Image (tube, rainbow, N blue to C red):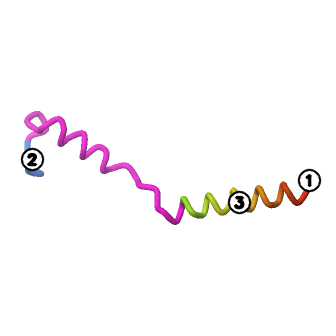
Amino acid sequence: MADPSDADPENRDPEEVEMQRRSDLPTLSPWLILVVIAMLAVGVYAVSALL
């Protein structure tokens, strides 16, 4: 069961604390992943055009 937000940090469930720590990390947007893949494809195309 989730701890209340005003719970004393010493009394919190360790699993709940770990999940909270992970939720502070930024997530990768699917669009960011697609843009990186597209940039890699353009780079491969440019290198192959030079060869």
Asked which secondary structure carries label 3, the reply is: helix
Q: Magenta segment: does it hold 12?
A: yes
Q: Amino acid at mark 2?
A: Asp
Image location (x, y in percent) of residue 26: 40, 53
Q: What residue is drawn where x is 8% and y is 50%?
A: 4
Residue bearing the label numbered 1: 51
Kind of residue at badge 3: Ala
Question: Which is closer to the viewer, label 2 or label 3?
Answer: 3
Spot the residue most to the bottom.
31
Residue ID for mark 2: 3
Q: Nearer the viewer, residue 30 or 24?
A: 30
Q: Residue at x 12, y 51 (%)?
A: 5
Could you tell which of marks 1 and 3 lies nearer the N-terminus?
Answer: 3
Q: Main structural element of the magenta stretch: helix, strand or loop? A: helix
Do labels 2 and 3 touch, CB within 8 Å? no
Q: Secondary structure at mark 2?
A: loop
In space, the residues marked 1 and 3 are separated at their CA atoms by 16 Å
Alpha carbon distance from label 2 to label 3: 46 Å
Left or right of 29? Residue 34 is right
Say whether marks 2 and 1 touch (CB < 8 Å). no
> With respect to residue 18, does 42 lie above or below?
below
Q: Nearer the viewer, residue 7 or 43?
A: 43
Q: Which label is found at residue 41? A: 3
The residue shown at (61%, 58%) is 36
Mark linked to residue 29: none
Around disc 3, counting alpha carbons within 10 Å, would you say few (fewer than 14), some (14 to 19), or many (20 or more)? few
Q: How many marks?
A: 3
Q: Nearer the viewer, mark 2 or mark 1?
A: 1
Element type at mark 1: loop
| Type of amino acid under label 1 | Leu
Residue bounds of the magenta highlight? 8-32
Q: Is residue 22 left or right of residue 15?
A: right
